[in-house]
């Protein structure tokens, strides 16, 4: 046997009595379940659960927001369409109501006018006569002068003309005749007479060729004819 040691000679390590075996170098140390490990495990579980819950909640909120926006847009379009349709329906109802109301008003007006036509025209005639009478009383001279001038323009007679006025207008008629002879020297001779059938402010001219009646009563008669011949349009 050689004295030189082989390079591959086996070596042996001797442990003391307090040393442990080598099995723990080959595998992790065994973890024993106790209160500390339980708490650590539960903390990890809670952390993972909270994280997952946050993810789920965030996803749910995002989906809910999307659904809400979509519903809002669809609801807006649907609501707008419904509103337009409702407006059109109400518009047609209003048009029909106004048409029926107009027809009813026209019919009612015709009925009222037909029932009270005579009374209405009588009131209008009385009001006209009253107001005209008041105006004539205040402006009798002007009215008489205007009617005389109108009558004179229609005179074609060369013979004597008789002018009739009411007794109360005698002084006014004399003034008018005097001024007329100055302004129109070619006028035929005019004789002034009074007549009780001529209303104040009126005048009637008579000659051998005809009569020119510009009395107030004749003017009233023209107005009455207008009232009597009036037809409701």
Image (spheres, rainbow, N blue to C red):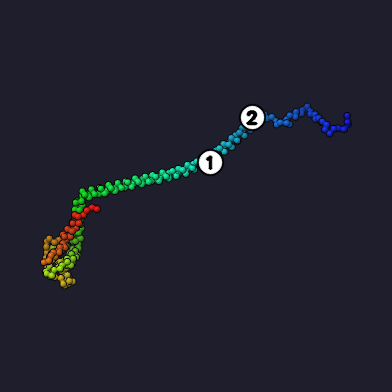
In the rendered image, the quadrant that contains the N terminus is top right
Whether residue 109 is situated above or below residue 194 in the rendered picture: above
> For the view shown, which residue lies furthest in the top direction?
17
Give residue 26's position: percent from left, percent from top: 73, 31
Q: Nearer the viewer, residue 80 or 163?
A: 80
Which residue is denoted by mark 1 in the rendering? 62
> In percent of the image, x 11 and y 69: which residue is there?
160
Q: Name the quadrant containing residue 90.
A: top left
> In percent of the image, x 13 and y 64: which residue is there?
211
Which residue is denoted by mark 2 in the rendering? 35
Q: Name the quadrant containing residue 173.
A: bottom left
Q: Which mark is residue 118?
A: none
Lateral position of residue 6 relative to residue 48, left or right: right
Q: CA distance from mark 1 to mark 2?
A: 40 Å
Give residue 56's position: percent from left, percent from top: 56, 37
Give residue 65's position: percent from left, percent from top: 51, 41
Q: Nearer the viewer, residue 55 or 31?
A: 55
Give residue 218's position: percent from left, percent from top: 16, 60
Q: Name the quadrant containing residue 28.
A: top right
Q: Nearer the viewer, residue 134 or 45?
A: 45
SS state under label 2: helix
Whether residue 93 is situated above or below residue 222 in the rendered picture: above
Classed neighbour count for the residue bearing mark 2: other residues with Cα under 10 Å, few (<14), some (14–19), many (≥20): few
Classed neighbour count for the residue bearing mark 1: other residues with Cα under 10 Å, few (<14), some (14–19), many (≥20): few
> In percent of the image, x 18 and y 65: which residue is there?
150
**Any part of residue 36 in sight:** no
Looking at marks 1 and 2 on the same chain, the residue that comes earlier in the sequence is marked by: 2
Lateral position of residue 70 relative to residue 170, left or right: right
Contact, mark 1 vs mark 2 (Cβ under 8 Å): no
Dot in front, 1 or 2 = 1
SS state under label 1: helix
């Amino acid at each position: 046997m050689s004295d030189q040691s082989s390079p591959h000679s086996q070596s042996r390590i001797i442990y003391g009595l307090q040393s442990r075996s080598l099995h723990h170098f080959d595998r992790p140390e065994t973890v024993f379940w106790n209160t500390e490990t339980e708490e650590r495990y539960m903390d990890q579980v809670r952390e993972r659960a909270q994280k997952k819950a946050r993810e789920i909640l965030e996803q749910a909120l995002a989906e809910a927001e999307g659904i809400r926006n979509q519903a809002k847009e669809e609801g807006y379009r649907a609501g707008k369409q419904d509103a337009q349709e409702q407006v059109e329906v109400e518009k047609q109802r209003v048009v029909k109501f106004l048409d029926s109301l107009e027809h009813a008003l026209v019919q009612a007006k015709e009925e009222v006018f037909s029932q009270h036509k005579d009374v209405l025209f009588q009131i209008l005639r009385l009001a006209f006569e009253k107001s005209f009478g008041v105006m004539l009383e205040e402006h009798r001279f002007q009215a008489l002068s205007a009617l005389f001038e109108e009558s004179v323009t229609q005179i074609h007679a060369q013979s004597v003309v008789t002018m009739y006025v009411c007794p109360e207008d005698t002084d006014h008629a004399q003034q008018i005749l005097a001024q007329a002879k100055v302004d129109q020297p070619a006028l035929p001779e005019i004789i002034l007479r009074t007549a009780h059938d001529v209303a104040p402010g009126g005048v009637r001219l008579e000659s051998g060729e005809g009569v020119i009646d510009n009395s107030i009563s004749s003017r009233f008669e023209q107005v009455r004819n207008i009232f009597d011949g009036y037809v409701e349009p």
